[in-house]
Amino acid sequence: MTDFVTNDLRARLIDGVHAAGRRVLAVYERDFAVETKDDQSPLTEADMASHHALVELLEAATPEVPILSEESGDIPYATRQTWQRYWLIDPLDGTKEFIKKNGEFTLNVALIEDGVPVFGIVHAPVLGTTWVGQHGQGAWKQGTAGSAEPITVRALPNPEQEAWKIVGSRSHGSAEFEAFCAELPAHERVSMGSSLKLCLVAEGAADLYPRLAPTSEWDTAAAQAVVTAAGGDVLNAHTLEPLRCNQQDSVLNPFFIVSGQRDERWENALRFQRKLEA
């Protein structure tokens, strides 16, 4: 779909995201103040340090491409809807996990083309791990040694022989999630913060991530690019159509589900859960 991200540009962006991650770690490893935004979500100086670093990186690398960041998210839709291609970034996803100092937070950079996340970088500084996905190129995981290993989603196991692995939020549980899981075959749950949950599905470490609670497009776009490049899906939980960005004034996502493989058993569980909503 895109040849915009060349090998050289991709390498430059990964290096820049890692540099932003080091700025975040410098804050993480000392005491820091926590503010509260208008929507009651927390904000730290690390959020803003990462925001400025990533914006500077992208403006220098691709000055012709507009940028939408969680920390500059007030760009009107009348402007945004004219964008065929733009960068969508979440400078620090999982601020609650950052504050708890459990390491489960990420820096996220996505390239959106015609509403579709076609390239994404998800970097977890404390874990020393980066996930990258690019349409037509595949997905890979890079550790502290710097070597990149290709990743793919896994085939859904027979639950009578191996329990499905279902990822849930560490800080945002919901009754809808519980109702969905109650209708599934044998499964075990893995709790995780931030966009790491999508990356677990992308690398075949989990089978499903049902997100039946609010999120914004910048929370998911980079990891969605990784998931789809790895062979999985990020689907609207009501329509089972792929999640798209920049289709309306609001940047809120619908409820969604991340899957390595479509299967009528979890699709039926999702339909049952929707009946409970109605």
Image (tube, rainbow, N blue to C red):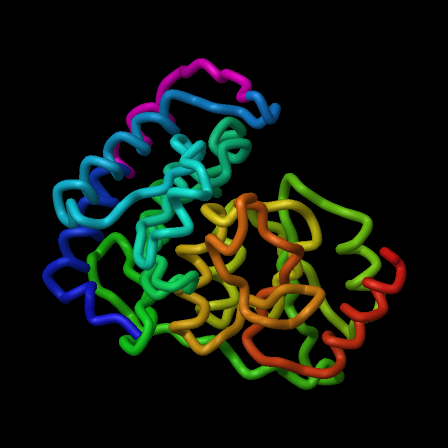
Q: Return the x and y of residue 251 as percentages of the image width and height.
A: 53, 45
Quadrant holding the C terminus: bottom right
Quadrant holding the N terminus: bottom left
Residue 131 appearing in the image: no
Question: Which residues fall within the magenta stretch?
Answer: 21-37
Q: Which residue lies at the image location 32% right of the left edge and 31% below the top edge? A: 24
The picture quadrant where one finds residue 182 is: bottom right
Q: Return the x and y of residue 26 as percentages of the image width and height.
A: 29, 26
Q: Does 86 appear above or below 1?
A: above
* Magenta stretch encompasses residue 36: yes
Q: Which residue lies at the image location 75% right of the left edge and 84% below the top edge? A: 160
Q: Left of 88 or right of it: where is 8?
A: left
The picture quadrant where one finds residue 41 is: top right
Q: Nearer the viewer, residue 236 or 31?
A: 236
The picture quadrant where one finds residue 69 is: top left
Q: Left of 67 or right of it: where is 63?
A: left
Q: Does 23 appear above or below 238?
A: above
Q: Nearer the viewer, residue 236 or 143?
A: 236
Q: Left of 10 or right of it: where is 130?
A: right
